Image (cartoon, rainbow, N blue to C red):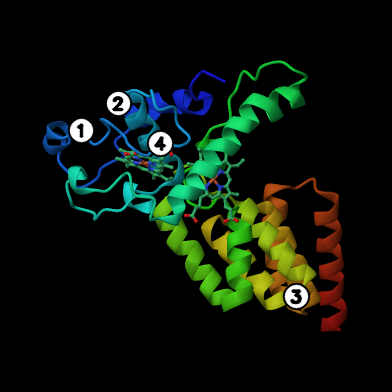
Amino acid sequence: MKTGFTILSNCALLAWLSAAWSPGASAQSVQAVNPFADPTNLTVLPKTITTRELSRTMKSFTQALGVRCTHCHVGEEGQSLSEYDFASDEKAAKEVARGMMQMVEHLNRQALPAALGAASPSVAIQCVSCHRGQRLPQQLEDRLQQIAEEQGTEAAIAEYWRLRDQYYGQQGLDFSDQPLIALAERSYERQDLVQSRAWLDLALELNPRCEQCLYYRARQRAVGGDLTGALSDIRAYLEIRPESPPGQALLLELEARVASGAR
Ligand code: HEC
Ligand code: HEC
């Protein structure tokens, strides 16, 4: 296989245009000593790679993973790039990245064409296809559930706020209602009603018109005996979805329970 890397060319332009890459060195010093000239330790990239293509590739890595050069290379933030030791293999992430490059190459050259029936893919897989700006391509709900299990509900909610502050509006993490609803359902299945409720409260704090959340919380409140709270939720839900048969059924049931309790 003679040709260069399919993974690299597509994402390169974007990476090039974007300013997300901002190592401490000034543009001037980068120009003075081009760190991409004369690489000595390429084992996966073609040795004939141009300075420019190598630079684009590296910038695309930082973008795809939301990291800086120092994640994979020996060097200090704020140092000029000419003082980095890019050839060093000291950092484990660099070796992982080599494996990832080979994996992506395999996907594009073999797995994807095979899946498509020997056609060459019109969309190539790139680092960003999975990573989406994150070091670990993990879904928000999976990450939060892990934290909830290890450190408890409060820590998981704190992490949600932290991530939201940091990543809201960027690619990668889904800050819609859905991950919180998924978390509420998972907690409910584990019969952790307190945690389930905490996720629903958070979802409704962020989006008071989350209909699924309102319906779900109404049911949970009803089960827990909080009829007033349940009624208020189901009414809010029916304002958004007046035609919903399960919503109307729950309203009737709750009203009947209140009436019989009052008698
Ligand atoms: C995700 C990990 C990762 C990030 C982030 C990364 N690199 Fe690399 N870099 C590599 C890997 C892996 C190689 C070696 C590729 C090979 O073996 O073919 C490499 C090689 C290099 C080389 C060639 C070194 C030599 O002499 O062989 C330079 C220069 C370089 N990177 C610069 C940078 C710069 C500048 C940044 C930040 C904009 C950066 N890299 C970000 C993984 C990374
Ligand atoms: C098919 C999906 C996929 C693609 C494409 C992909 N990765 Fe990954 N990568 C992963 C997964 C999943 C992990 C986390 C594995 C784990 O920790 O269990 C990971 C982890 C990594 C890590 C380790 C992160 C750390 O520091 O702990 C590096 C570095 C990395 N990927 C670099 C790359 C680079 C560079 C590319 C493009 C050449 C790439 N990945 C493409 C799925 C992918």
Q: Residues within 10 Å of mark 4 (few under 14, many from 20)?
A: few
Ligand 1 position by quadrant: top left
Residue 77 x, y percent position in the rendering = 23, 54
Instruction: Indicate if the residue with disc 4 has its beta carbon within 8 Å of ligand 1.
Output: yes
Quadrant for residue 208, please give it.
bottom right
Q: Mark 1 points at which residue?
A: 34
Q: How crowded is mark 3: few (under 14 residues within 10 Å), some or many (20 or more)?
A: some
Mark 4: which amino acid?
Leu
Instruction: Check contact, mark 4 vs mark 3: CB within 8 A.
Output: no
Residue 150 x, y percent position in the rendering = 60, 76
Mark 3: which amino acid?
Leu
Q: Name the residue under label 2.
A: 51
- Name the residue located 58 percent from the left edge and 61 percent from the top edge: 143
* Mark number displayed over residue 88: none
- The image quadrant where one finds the C terminus is bottom right
Instruction: Check contact, mark 1 vs mark 2: CB within 8 A.
Output: yes
Q: Residues within 10 Å of mark 2 (few under 14, many from 20)?
A: some
Q: Name the residue under label 4.
A: 42
Q: Going by the image, does 234 lie left or right of 11?
A: right
Q: Give the mark nearer the N terminus: 3 vs 2.
A: 2
Q: Is mark 1 on a helix, strand or loop?
A: loop
Q: Give the mark nearer the N terminus: 1 vs 2.
A: 1
* Mark number displayed over residue 227: 3
Instruction: Indicate if the residue with disc 1 has its beta carbon within 8 Å of ligand 1.
Output: no
Quadrant for residue 104, please give it.
top right
Q: Which residue lies furthest to the top in this view?
A: 119
Residue 243 to residue 141: above or below: above
Q: What element carries label 2?
A: helix
Of tags 4 and 3, the one toward the viewer is: 4
